[in-house]
Image: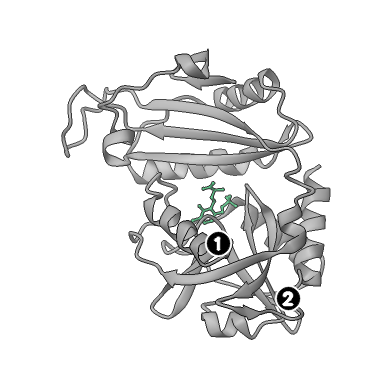
Amino acid sequence: RTVYVNGEYLPEEDAKISIFDRGFLMADAVYEVTSVLDGKLIDFEGHAVRLKRSLDELDMAEPCSKDELLEIHRKLVEENGIVEGLVYLQVTRGSDGDRDFVFPSDDTPPSIVLFTQNKPGLADSPAAKKGAKIISIEDIRWGRRDIKTVQLLYPSMGKMMAKKAGCDDAWLVEDGHVTEGTSNNAYFVKDGVIVTRPLSNDILHGITRKAVLRMAAEAQLKIEERLFTIEEAQGADEAFTTSASAFVMPVVEIDGVALGDGTPGPIATRLREIYLDESL
Ligand code: PDD
């Protein structure tokens, strides 16, 4: 695999980042994941805009222009022959060669890394046909989840807790209400109405969320953006999650309670089809 590190395209085994890099020492870094379908980047623009926002919120310098970013994404997809997969992008505050809680001076260049992940079968996914089983866990992440930082230890632990329980993923609950999934936004559907938490600093503003809500509105589906509990979702007709890495993923079980007949629901299935159709 060819990867991109700080201005260079290299074989992955030759790519290097300093051990003092603040992304490594302090999780002082932001990231984006953009999906690739049929060799094309999905919603690059949305991811580029969110990256800029994450950088601005953390007072971090832009490593390059949006046009350059697009060029790097395209080149890696082409070089690595990605038809279905992902492009991972990470920008860190870099390093001035030591460990210090204080940010390095403004002229310290940020680090930027991109690599591709080949995922054949991403669109025609067996996991999406089965639907996901979810557990709920407490959301103990920090209060700026709208910034896409690489502080992913708790979400990783959440996935491991789900796996241990024989499930696929976890939904996070704060003050009795679902915030989002470990790496996706969360929805349920009751009597034809799609319910999802409104945007705030409590959740990541999903690029897929925005696209899917637009497509749902265009399909004349009703949408309510409001807080909801696990119990309410358990009593729903169906549920699903959205993310760049799994598009629309039906949810068939929450904390051991099957939704509907325990198979992917019609609205989740339809939204997945619409999303894939429009993206291709
Ligand atoms: N995760 N919420 C969280 C906490 C996420 O980490 C993600 C994305 C989403 C969905 O956002 P989007 O639709 O823009 O992908 C919501 C990526 C895919 C990841 O960490 O791999």
Q: In which quadrant of the rendered view does residue 157 lie? A: bottom left
101 relative position to 272: left or right = left
Q: Secondary structure at mark 1?
A: strand
Local packing at callout 2 (Cα closer than 10 Å; few below 14, some 14-19, many 20+) is: some
First in residue order: circle 2 vs circle 1: 1
Q: State the residue at coordinates (71%, 28%).
A: 82
Are the residues at dot 2 and dot 1 in contact (C-beta closer than 8 Å)?
A: no
At which x and y percent is residue 52?
A: 47, 39
Q: Name the quadrant containing residue 274.
A: bottom right
In the foreground, 107 or 77? 77
**Circle 1 Cα neighbour tier, 10 Å, few/some/many (<14 / 14–19 / ≥20):** many
Residue 134, picture quadrant: bottom right
Q: Give the labeled residue for mark 2.
A: 262
Position in image of residue 26 (x %, y %):
27, 40
Residue 261 spot, x, y in % from top left: 77, 80
Amino acid type, label 2: Gly
Residue at the spot of label 1: 169
Task: State which quarter of the image contains the C terminus.
Answer: top right
Q: Is residue 66 visible?
A: no
In the picture, measured across the screen, residue 33 lies left or right of residue 64, that is: right
Helix, strand or loop for disc 2? loop
Q: Which residue is rendered at x = 49% and y = 13% of the image?
A: 8
Label number found at residue 272: none
Whether 157 is drawn above or below 80: the answer is below
- Residue drawn at (39%, 67%), measured in percent from left and top? 139
